[in-house]
């Protein structure tokens, strides 16, 4: 709950205000003791007291990248999102320089282009010293105007990527900003007025009142030409400085575009190499699958060949066994047939002998005696085992 953004806060640059700080730096701030103890429950009013206690500025330092109290307070301002009037009062505060720098940094993160130039450019006239803690944890000396120039010209400050803003000459060409007027121009004008007053006094003392008022004094003409040349040189120098700033901005933008193009080319080459490696791995995997498939197919073909040979050998063995069985059966049938023929042929040959023997036995029994009584008595005697009657 202590790290959540205020529900009434508006999105800045299309995102959560706290997302303007990188995730790693944001997590370091959430884990910092100063954030947990000193920044808990701060409001826009009580934040001023903590800002007045600041004695240096900076981003993260040390081996574990510990955030400074300045960064913790910037994070707290992004979380509670104070009103614009409070931030402007921070910037206009001349008693506490770190309060002024804190407001300027917050406005650089969240403000519009016009507000940034309008409220930060007057701080170029502040030459007070500041203590800046470097990433090694050492303090270095800087000034307010130098730090404001860093905020307006660089894209990175205090380990935070600053949002990109339009160039000043772009806003001037769109009539959204007036040309910047240096504070030294007032001093130049005062010096010019002094020179004119001195020349006027000198001219009146020399008795050249008539020439001065009629404008035909050679001294006045010479001073006017000198002043005109000085003004033309000053405006030329200002135009030259503006063109030089424009050229420097143009070169920086061109270098940035070139670096971004190189980074895009590197990303494209990296993607191409990754696609080539992926395609090579896919081709190697396909070849391995084809080899495995061919090996499995050869193994399956060998198995089928062995099965076919086994079936053929079994078929041949069964065929030879059936042929030998058929031969044995045929021989057995022939033997049976011969035996049957032999047994069936013997009764036809022995039948007359049996008939003759039966007739002979019948004659010897006396059962065929012409006398029926004697034949009956012989049959009875034959059953008793006695000799027949004659």
Image (cartoon, helix red, strand yellow):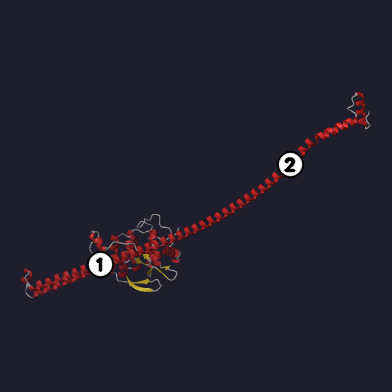
Q: Which percent across, then down, holds residue 294?
A: 51, 57
Q: Can you say which quadrant of the picture contains the N terminus?
A: bottom left
Q: Which percent across, then down, holds residue 164?
A: 32, 62
Q: In the image, what residue occupies the spot 64% across and 48% down? A: 319
Closer to viewer: mark 1 or mark 2: 2
Front residue of 385 and 355 = 355
- Within-10-Å neighbours for mark 1: few <14, some 14–19, many 20+: few
Numbered label tally: 2
The correct choice, above or below, for 113 with respect to 349 in the image is below
- The residue pinned by badge 2 equals 338
- Within-10-Å neighbours for mark 2: few <14, some 14–19, many 20+: few
**Pointers 1 and 2 in contact (C-beta within 8 Å):** no
Cα distance, mark 1 to mark 2? 132 Å
Helix, strand or loop at disc 2?
helix
- The residue pinned by badge 1 equals 247
Which badge, 1 or 2, comes first in the chain's sequence?
A: 1
Helix, strand or loop at disc 1?
helix
Q: In the image, what residue occupies the spot 58% across and 52% down? A: 308
Q: Which percent across, then down, holds residue 373?
A: 92, 24
Q: Is residue 305 left or right of residue 359?
A: left
Q: Residue furthest bottom?
A: 206
């Amino acid at each position: 709950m202590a790290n959540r953004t205020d529900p009434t806060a508006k999105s800045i640059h299309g995102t959560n205000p706290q997302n303007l700080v990188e995730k790693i730096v944001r997590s370091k701030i959430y884990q910092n003791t100063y954030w947990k103890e000193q920044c808990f429950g701060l409001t826009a009013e009580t934040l001023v007291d903590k800002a007045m206690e600041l004695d240096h500025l900076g981003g993260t330092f040390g081996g574990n990248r510990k955030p400074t109290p300045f960064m913790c307070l910037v994070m707290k301002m992004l979380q509670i999102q104070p009103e614009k009037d409070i931030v402007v009062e921070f910037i206009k505060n001349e008693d506490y320089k770190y309060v002024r720098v804190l407001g300027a940094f917050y406005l650089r993160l969240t403000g519009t282009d016009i507000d940034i130039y309008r409220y930060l450019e007057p701080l170029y006239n502040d030459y007070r010293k500041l203590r800046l803690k470097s990433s090694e944890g050492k303090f270095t000396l800087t000034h307010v105007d130098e730090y404001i120039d860093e905020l307006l010209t660089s894209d990175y400050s205090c380990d935070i990527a600053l949002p990109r803003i339009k160039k000043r000459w772009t806003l001037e060409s769109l009539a959204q900003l007036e040309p910047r007027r240096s504070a030294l121009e007032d001093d130049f004008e005062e010096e010019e007025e002094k020179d004119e007053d001195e020349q006027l006094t000198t001219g009146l003392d020399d008795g050249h009142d008539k020439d001065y008022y009629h404008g035909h004094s050679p001294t006045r003409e010479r001073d006017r030409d000198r002043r005109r040349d000085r003004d033309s040189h000053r405006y030329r120098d200002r135009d030259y400085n503006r063109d030089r700033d424009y050229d420097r901005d143009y070169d920086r933008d061109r270098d940035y575009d070139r670096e971004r193009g190189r980074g895009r080319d590197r990303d494209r080459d990296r993607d191409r190499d990754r696609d080539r490696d992926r395609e090579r791995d896919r081709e190697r995997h396909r070849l391995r699958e084809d080899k495995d498939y061919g090996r499995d197919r050869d193994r399956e073909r060998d198995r089928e060949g062995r099965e076919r040979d086994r079936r053929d050998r079994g078929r041949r063995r069964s065929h030879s066994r059936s042929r030998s069985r058929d031969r044995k059966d045929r021989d057995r049938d022939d033997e049976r047939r011969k035996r049957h023929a032999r047994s069936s042929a013997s009764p036809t040959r022995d039948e007359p002998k049996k008939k003759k023997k039966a007739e002979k036995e019948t004659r010897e029994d006396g059962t065929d005696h012409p006398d029926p009584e004697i034949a009956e008595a012989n049959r009875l005697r034959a059953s008793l085992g006695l000799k027949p009657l004659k």
